[in-house]
Image (cartoon, rainbow, N blue to C red):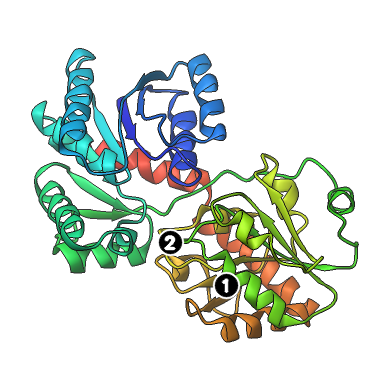
Amino acid sequence: MKIALIVESCLTGVGSHVCMICNNLAKNHEVHLLYSSARADASFQKELLHFSNIGVRLQEIQMSRSINLVSDWKTIQAISNYIRENGSFDIIHCHSSKAGVTGRIASILNGMSHKTLYTPNGLATLSTEAVGFKALLIWLAELLLGYLACQKVIAVSQDEQAYMLKTFKFNSNKVKVIENGISLLRPSRPRQVVRQELGIPDDALVFGFTGRLTYQKNPELLLKAFHNLNHPQSYLLFVGTGELLDTLKQTTNPRVIFTGERTDVPNLLNVFDVFVLPSRYEGLSLSAMEAMAASLPIICTRTFGASDLIIEGVNGFIVESENVTELVDVMRKLATSSTLRQSMSRASKLRFEEIFSADRMMQSLKELYVSLI
């Protein structure tokens, strides 16, 4: 198959998802990656070098997250020209909102909407980020392009599918659920060694978070809950960076540790005893999947995709967003019961293997691709 993947957001999450698809497809298919470097993190940039070596054809496209009719039209023209100049594609797969709009319009201009797929990667989160005229413009674009400019829209969770069917009145055949998947990453260094480097005792209980320290992820809620937990044997580990890092670091609690951005996340997950995701909104969290793959109990707020990840009381707990009291209560349950932690640890790994493995996701995606040829 000849496949074009189009993406604007090349950060952790969407960027990692697209990279995994590229790595898998490049073994047996001709893959073209059209991307923007405006929001590309170090991990994505590193993958670009690898893609050049395995035959993925790379094309940088000027794309911005913000809405600007002039620059967006230039983006559409650039994508359209690339599609036309590089022959007929079997599949055009657009990822996230901006590439979804520009890529799908470009596919219409080339008469290829019947071969086009769109993965919003958290369409419902747009309603939390946009207001007023911008929100209306996004809604109209998603509605019209969903009907006119793609064969299928891929939802990454059952929650997202339900949102699409309700909000845009799509036919159920229009929306295909393919849960995101990840490859199983194993730690390369012993747990005890990494804990020593971080200044964490061997017998300490570690609550951990990985991801961007931003408004969306709401790390302040987790920090407040940890302070209220008042469990002297517990530590809190934040792995990642973002605009809230300096504010969070004002805490005087010596048992709260900030690692900054790290490339050895599996080693740090191996240090955790419990993973906590306090987000205000999510699509389907890849960081939570990574924690499940690492056999960790999961605590997360009630966002889109939460019920796909967690079976309440089996592999973790779902708490209401912004409810610090409820978060403290479930953190205390896990802090005081090693039996519960061990049970949820086993259940998380099992659920990951059943639903969220990379092999399962890629098999479902390839079957969808083939059905459109």
Query: Which comes sooner in the sequence, label 1 or label 2?
Result: 1
Residue 1 seen anywhere in this rendered image of the structure: no
In the rendered view, does 120 fall on the left or right side of 233?
A: left
Task: Give above or below for 331 relative to 147.
Answer: below
Left/right of residue 189 with respect to residue 229 in the rendered view: right
Q: Please give the label number shown on residue 83.
A: none
Tell me the residue that label 2 is attached to.
282
- The kind of secondary structure element at disc 2 is loop
* Residue 236 or residue 133, whichever sits in front: 133
Question: What is the x, y in percent for residue 11?
Answer: 47, 41
Q: Say which element carries label 1.
A: helix
Closest to the observer: 27 or 23? 23
Residue 247 figure quarter = bottom right
The amino acid type, in three-letter code, at marker 1 is Leu
Query: Is 338 placed left or right of 128 in the picture?
Result: right
Quadrant holding the N terminus: top left
The residues bearing labels 1 and 2 have C-alpha atoms spaced at a distance of 15 Å
Counting from the top left corner in percent of width and height, residue 284 is at 44, 58
Q: Nearer the viewer, residue 181 or 107?
A: 107
Q: Quadrant of the C terminus?
A: top left
Point 75% across, 47% down: residue: 267
- x and y percent of residue 287 in the render? 56, 54
Residue behind mark 1: 221
Residue shown at the point (87%, 48%) measured from the top left: 197
Residue 170 in sight here = yes
Q: Which residue sits at x=20%, y=15%?
A: 87
Q: Nearer the viewer, mark 1 or mark 2?
A: 1
Decide: few, some or many residues near mark 2? Use Cα within 10 Å; few <14, some 14-19, many ≥20: many
The amino acid sitting under disc 2 is Glu
Residue for point 22% across, 34% down: 103
Q: How many marks?
A: 2
Work out whether 11 lies above or below 33.
below
